[in-house]
């Protein structure tokens, strides 16, 4: 089936009231070719000579409930039919559905109710295509992953938040962007996609980035700036690595999500923004809640349609398909000998699909066209980390709490040295929040200054 997109639909309006007909037509013109009928006879003629994708039918035309005959006729032609009526009698509504209408809207209807009609229409005609597209972009036939992806089709019908979890490199950002594309197709118009990686911005800046600020709100605010919440109005706000968001910001953002309004820093004027939230994390938020590092009420607000993306090692049957895709994506074709294929299949791929893509990109730059085991060894990590060794006598001497605190500070010190004191990279590598980072850093500084 050919996918219906913006401007390709054939729509029929059957409405005897001129003002109502013109008003509806003005809302539908950008979606495709709109034809009008002001009577039952005119509608029958148009339906007989044309095939319509959607039809909006008033029940009371020149005679009471004459529109029901139009509904039945459109049902025979498999047109997605929406009844528009001031009648709220249950028997009338039931009859309209029995005759084949797909939606029944009470007059006066709203812009939101019309948008929901188009969401349901596109979902109905593109359901199989949408799932196939998701399978194609993830290059998967894994049954459990496909089941997770099926949730996306349901999610497109509403505005509830979407929560994506999965290890780093499994495609969370990729999926969020694809959901945005699907949303634009359903809505029939372009919309904003605003992306913030919470792990890449300091706690002192994240509030102003999200909520915006007025000129003079703080030192350095030389001009007013719109925040990401405002920029996402009518579209999607994607908060990646949301587990690293400071608790103080979670509380303020919770209120903004619930009320769809907020105050920029330094402003007394409330800003309204009707955005849809997609959030993602590679961490276990329930564990962070138990530790007091994440608000339970914020978690319940950001979840809604929950999707978990499997690690690559858990979908090994997709591995060869992914390898061939990334090889063909590059400009130079390469092949793997039997020893290299064995290593690729047995490797755990801790960096998931992202690591696989990077590995193949590097191999394609080498002068060897046939990849061997020797070529792979320096590129792949040395397998799963060794078990942590500890000194039980030292634990007894210091106590478990002090021993763990020392271990934390040692790990943080090594990570900072490895990352050349880059805070955001260290936060991302260790998968810890800003609060945890600075808590451990304070202990490290105290220890090195001799205060602890």
Image (cartoon, grey):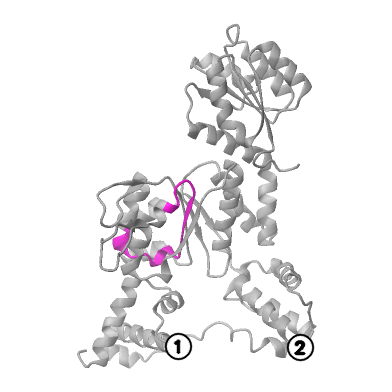
Q: Is residue 296 visible?
A: no
Element under disc 2: loop
Q: Quadrant of residue 138?
A: bottom right
Q: Quadrant of residue 370?
A: bottom right
Q: CA distance from mark 2 to mark 1?
A: 30 Å
Residue 418: mark: 1
Along the horizontal axis of the image, is 367 left or right of 182? Answer: right
Q: Which residues are magenta?
A: 231-250
Q: Position of residue 450 (x, y in %)?
A: 22, 93
Along the horizontal axis of the image, is 396 left or right of 429? Answer: left
Q: Nearer the viewer, mark 2 or mark 1?
A: 2
Give the vertical position of 211 relative to 412 (above or below).
Answer: above
Q: Quadrant of residue 32?
A: top right
Give the vertical position of 326 relative to 15 (above or below).
Answer: below
Residue drawn where x is 61% and y is 45% of the image: 185
Viewer-proximal residue among 380 and 359:
359
Queried whether the magenta region covers residue 234, the answer comes back as yes
Residue drawn where x is 29% and y is 86% of the image: 444
Along the horizontal axis of the image, is 406 left or right of 318? Answer: left
Along the horizontal axis of the image, is 329 left or right of 93? Answer: right
Q: Position of residue 411 (x, y in %)?
A: 39, 85
Viewer-proximal residue among 12 and 380:
12
Residue 367: mark: 2
Q: Position of residue 123 (x, y in %)?
A: 62, 40
């Amino acid at each position: 089936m050919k996918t219906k997109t913006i401007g390709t639909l054939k729509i029929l309006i059957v409405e005897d009231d001129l003002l109502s007909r013109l008003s509806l037509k003005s809302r539908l013109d950008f979606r495709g070719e709109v034809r009008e009928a002001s009577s039952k006879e005119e509608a029958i003629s148009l339906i007989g000579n044309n095939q319509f994708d959607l039809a909006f039918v008033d029940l009371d035309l020149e005679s009471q409930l004459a529109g029901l005959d139009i509904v039945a006729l459109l049902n025979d032609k498999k047109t997605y039919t929406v009844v528009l009526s001031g009648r709220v009698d249950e028997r009338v509504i039931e009859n309209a559905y029995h005759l084949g209408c797909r939606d029944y809207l009470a007059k006066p209807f709203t812009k939101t109710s019309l948008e929901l009609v188009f969401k349901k229409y596109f979902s109905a005609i593109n359901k199989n295509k949408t799932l196939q597209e998701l399978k194609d972009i993830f290059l998967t036939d894994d049954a459990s992953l496909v089941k997770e992806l099926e949730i996306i089709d349901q999610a497109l019908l509403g505005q509830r938040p979407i929560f994506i979890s999965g290890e780093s490199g499994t495609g969370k950002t990729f999926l969020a962007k694809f959901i945005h594309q699907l949303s634009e197709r359903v809505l029939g118009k372009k919309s904003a996609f605003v992306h913030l990686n919470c792990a890449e911005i300091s706690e002192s800046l994240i509030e102003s980035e999200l909520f915006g600020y007025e000129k003079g709100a703080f030192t350095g605010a030389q001009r007013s700036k719109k925040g990401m919440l405002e920029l996402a109005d009518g579209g999607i706000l994607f908060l990646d690595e949301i587990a690293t968001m400071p608790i103080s910001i979670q509380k303020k953002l919770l209120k903004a999500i619930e009320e769809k309004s907020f105050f920029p820093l330094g402003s007394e004027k409330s800003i309204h923004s009707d955005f849809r939230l997609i959030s993602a994390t590679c961490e276990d938020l329930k564990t962070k809640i138990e530790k007091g590092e994440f608000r339970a009420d914020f978690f319940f607000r950001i979840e809604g349609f929950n999707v978990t993306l499997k690690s690559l090692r858990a979908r090994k049957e997709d591995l060869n398909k992914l390898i061939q895709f990334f090889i063909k994506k590059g400009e130079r074709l390469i092949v793997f000998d039997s020893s290299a294929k064995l290593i690729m299949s047995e490797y755990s791929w801790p960096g998931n699909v992202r690591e696989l893509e990077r590995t193949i990109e590097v191999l394609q730059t080498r002068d060897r066209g046939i990849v061997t085991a020797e070529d792979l060894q320096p590129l792949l990590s040395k397998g799963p980390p060794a078990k942590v060794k500890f000194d039980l006598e030292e634990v007894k001497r210091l106590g478990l709490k002090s021993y763990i605190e020392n271990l934390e500070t040692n790990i943080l010190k090594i990570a900072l040295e490895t990352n050349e004191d880059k805070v955001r990279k260290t936060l991302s590598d260790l998968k810890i929040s800003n609060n945890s980072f600075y808590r451990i850093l304070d202990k490290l500084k105290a220890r090195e200054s001799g205060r602890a």
